[in-house]
Amino acid sequence: MRNVLKKLSPFIAPYKSKIIFAVFIGVVGSCVNLFVPDAIKNISNVIQDGIKGNIDLTLVKRYGIVALIAVVVVLVCNVLSGRLMAKYGRSVGRDLRNAINNKINHITIAKMDSLSPGELIARSVSDVSAVESIIARVLCAIIVNLVMIIGSVVMMFKMSVSLSLCVIVSVLLGSFISTVITKKTTPIMKAQRTEMAFMNAQIDESLNGHMLIKAFNAEEDVKKAFNDNNERIRKDSKKAQFLSSVMTPMMSLTNNISYAVVVIFGAYLSLHGNSDITIGVIIAFVMYSRMFAAPVSTLAGTIPQIMLTSVSADRIVDLLDMPENEDVGTKTVDNLKGRVVFDNVRFGYSENKEIIHGFSATIEPGMKVAIVGPTGAGKSTIINLLMRFYEINSGSISIDGVDIKDMKREELHRILGMVLQETWVFTGTITENLIYSTQGVTKEQLKQVILDCGLQYLISTLPDGMDTVLNGDSISAGQKQLVTIGRVMLKNPDILILDEATSSVDTRTEKLIQDAIDKLASDKTSFVIAHRLSTIKNADLIFFLKDGDIVECGKHEELLERGGAYAELYNSQFSKK
């Protein structure tokens, strides 16, 4: 438990004093609870002494009131402590989820590429829930149960050392058995948690690739992979549940043996002249032995949960310790003109494989630059480096003479506007998707953008118009692309980047969008990645990339006249049969 608290101390620290107060209330309840058996003992002794004469009912009443008050105080303390710990556990869980979400937003894309969505979901939901549960239910219980164990031992030794030793030996025997079982259970639970994370990833992939699975008749392969993983989880669960189910009966058996020992050995001592062992003492001893045995059983039962939560804490801390995008720049670009310079840029997604080899280019303000080439040439990579999604290995990229490394990403992304090839819309209205994070948008600006990017027909077909909530596949891929283009147009960035922006739309819509983009980019530096070479004929400069190098550079007509790689690619698209 100390290991869990140490790893998550930054999140528990804000609630430390409140948690201590809640634990203190629970401890008070435990201490008061220790007086109940003593009061019952006194009542029993008074009745025993008065059997042959008159029973002192006043004394019985007095001890009864003490017992009743103690029981009520214990109830109030337990309820209050439990509610407070649940509240603080939820607060820690909320803070953890916020931290994980913030981390995901700042983690390097290179690291993000190595993580599956299912793995991230498991850490954000399942692992956080495990931590939340152990703080809400187990943390206070550990301390309260330890107090109960120590207190009950002290009270038992005050009444009889020999009976106390009998109880302790029998309970510790059961605890030893539970410890052995726990050691066998923990690695199985760790394996089960890993398999569950893998299953989350499988489900996520199956949902996202549902149409692809159908198209290739891969249902049986996907089903088999899922069933195999599900079977491994079942086997691990079976082993863990079997071992866990053995623990409780074993503890109950040893506890019951201790109760029997107390009664039999206590009766033996009483019958053989030990006047200190009365009926009241035996009754109190049985109650104290329960107070001693029950917390031991509870603590033994929490060990697997604590170990499993320790694994969850490890996974959460590993995620929170992942490298973030460095963002120490302070420079800004005032009166931006849009001059972009790539100076001997080298980059590779892995250390052993460089894919951009000394890329150098100067783009003057207001130029429309097209980047073309075969698949895998490095076109999108150049744009990703400009956006600082990845850090270059060497060289530099500057905007108006300011190295983008010296700028905050927030400032850089304020300057740049990008339409990705992959469309992305979130669950929300069309208006919310268009505005997104752009501030100060007027209704007139919104209407103009809807007209410019051809969204008016889509909106007219939706049941609630602009207030229609988009989710899942409620609109086509091409319509989603229209929304993403409208989003960038509404942002009105200083430098425009289009990565296959019209790949998902039909020819008629493409012409409409192209006119809108030309209008938007008329006085801006813009970068266009396109496979449809017809869309970049009017580019001021065309780079033809191959294997991370610029093999040709020039205007459309110039490159056609040269009859090189660009002309060959262009003619392959428009050749007549």
Image (cartoon, grey):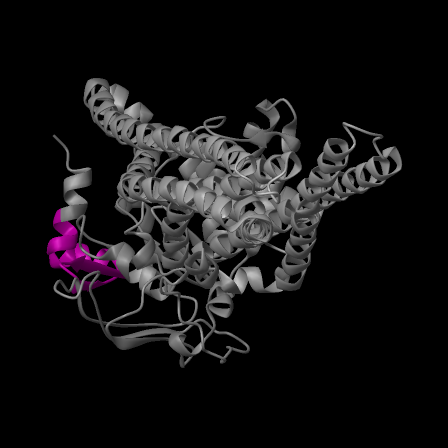
For residue 369: magenta?
A: no
Judge by depth and name the residue closer to the eye, 486 or 241: 241
Residue at 44 percent across and 72 percent down: it is 327
Residue at 52 percent across and 31 percent down: it is 471
Residue at 12 percent across and 48 percent down: it is 568
Instruction: Find residue 121 and report its horizontal and vertical position in percent.
Output: 42, 42
Instruction: Find residue 29 and report its horizontal and vertical position in percent.
Output: 69, 48
For the N terminus, give its image quadrant.
bottom left
> Magenta residues, as a range?
540-568
**268 versus 549 height, above or below:** above
Instruction: Find residue 325 and report its horizontal and vertical position in percent.
Output: 39, 66
| Tag count | 0
In the rendered image, which quarter is residue 274 located in? Answer: top right
In the rendered image, which quarter is residue 504 located in? Answer: top left
For residue 564: magenta?
A: yes
Instruction: Find residue 359 and report its horizontal and vertical position in percent.
Output: 21, 70
For the C terminus, give its image quadrant.
top left
**Farthest right residue in view:** 58
Residue 440 visible here: no
Q: In this view, does 516 lie to the left or right of 122?
A: right
**296 versus 371 height, above or below:** above
Q: In this view, does 208 lie to the left or right of 218?
A: right
Residue 526 visible here: yes
Judge by depth and name the residue closer to the eye, 357 or 19: 19
Judge by depth and name the residue closer to the eye, 128 or 417: 128
In the rendered image, which quarter is residue 283 located in? Answer: top right
Residue at 65 percent across and 44 percent down: it is 82
